[in-house]
């Protein structure tokens, strides 16, 4: 059974913060082992690459927990479609100027 991200967003924030839209900027980044730019966000002058949109809160929590268990830092953004998981990319560099959306 699916849980609405809006009704239980406090539970997801236990593992990683859910960022306000005003706190981030959309962009594309390049990674050393990736031939093409990928979708990303900039938060506190650090790049986070797109992982996945989750409509099910339990699946979202499991994915974030797996990434953090491997030593990754993750953050969330919320959209009408669900929660978007982003992972910190320390080796990334900007492929385009951040969008001002």
Image (spheres, rainbow, N blue to C red):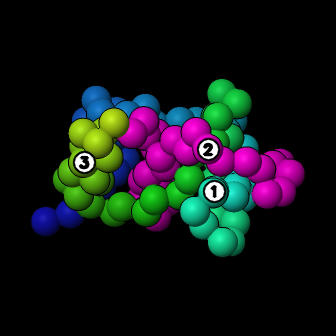
In what quadrant of the picture does the N terminus appear?
bottom left
Rendered view: 93 above or below 2: above
Q: Are marks 2 and 1 in contact (CB under 8 Å)?
A: yes
Within 10 Å of disc 2 (Cα), the crowding (few <14, some 14-19, many 20+) is few
Rendered view: 59 above or below 37: above
* Magenta span includes 83: yes
| Percent position of residue 88, x then y | 52, 41
Q: Which residue is at a point 53% across and 57% down the rendered structure image? A: 50
Q: Which residue is mark 2?
A: 91
Q: Which residue is at a point 73% across and 48% down the rendered structure image? A: 93
In this picture, which residue range is highlighted in magenta? 72-101
Which mark is first along the chain, 1 or 3? 1
Q: Is residue 90 left or right of residue 85?
A: right
- Foreground tag (3 vs 1): 1
Q: Which residue is mark 3?
A: 66
Within 10 Å of disc 3 (Cα), the crowding (few <14, some 14-19, many 20+) is few
Q: Is residue 20 left or right of residue 71?
A: right
| Percent position of residue 5, x then y | 34, 51
Q: Which residue is mark 1?
A: 31
Q: Is residue 97 left or right of residue 85?
A: right
| Percent position of residue 36, x then y | 68, 71
Q: Is residue 12 visible?
A: no
Residue extending furthest toward the left: 1
């Amino acid at each position: 059974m699916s849980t609405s991200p809006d009704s239980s967003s406090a539970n997801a924030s236990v593992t990683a913060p859910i960022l306000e839209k005003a706190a981030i900027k959309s962009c594309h980044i390049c990674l050393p082992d990736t031939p093409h730019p990928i979708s990303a966000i900039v938060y506190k002058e650090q790049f986070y690459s797109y992982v996945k949109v989750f409509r099910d809160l339990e699946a979202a929590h499991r994915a974030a927990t797996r990434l953090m268990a491997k030593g990754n830092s993750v953050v969330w953004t919320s959209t009408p479609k669900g929660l978007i998981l982003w992972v910190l990319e320390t080796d990334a560099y900007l492929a385009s100027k951040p969008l001002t959306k």
